Image: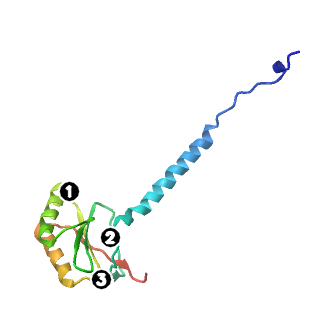
Amino acid sequence: MKLRSLRIEKQPELMIIPMIDIIFFLLVFFMMSTLYMAEQHTIPINLPQATAVQQEMSQNRNITIMQDGRIMFDQEEIPLPLLQKRIQVELAKQPENIFVVRADKQAEYGHVVAVLDELKISGARRVAVATDLKGR
């Protein structure tokens, strides 16, 4: 007697709909988590506070003025005399760049004015000053 032939042999089914749901969930999770990591690549400084804070989300170039007067262009330290040439190079590549001046609130006012002056001489038309929201 053949017992095997009496059993109904079913092939395993591959359920693709739950797999697609999981893949989309992972995709959304990683997209959202990378959005929150974008601001972590900046140099930590204490920004002054303002009540009218607006955040621009286009092509930004950060110019950071540290408390001790050092100037950082994005992530690299740059002396003040070379800042004008660096800004002109960035403007030649992308004329619509927004230069965000991020000065520590303990930095000397003269350093901030010198950087703003270099931006003006270089021909930068879109300049913003970064602040923190008052009440934080």
Q: Residue at 89% x, 15% y: name it.
A: 1
Image disc number at residue 43: 2
Q: Amino acid at mark 3?
A: Lys
Q: Nearest to the eye among marks 2 and 3: give it.
A: 2
Is 105 positioned to the left or the right of 5 in the image?
left
In this view of the protein, which residue sits in the foreground, 84 or 55? 84
Ranked by sequence position, the earlier of labels 2 and 3 is 2
- The image position of residue 7, as x and y in percent, is 82, 24
Three-letter code for the amino acid on which mark 1 is drawn: Gln
Of callouts 2 and 1, the N-terminal one: 2
For the residues labelled 1 and 3, the Cα–Cα distance comes to 29 Å
Q: Residue furthest top?
A: 1
Residue 38 sits in which quadrant?
bottom left
- Amino acid type of the residue tagged 2 in the rendering: Ile
Q: Which residue is identified by label 1? A: 94
Question: Marks 2 and 3, Cα distance to the nearest angstrom?
Answer: 14 Å
Disc 1 packing (10 Å; few <14; some 14–19; many ≥20): few
| Residue annotated with mark 3 | 105
**SS of the residue at dot 2?**
loop
Q: Comparing marks 1 and 3, which lies closer to the viewer? A: 3
Residue 95 drawn at (x, y percent): 18, 59
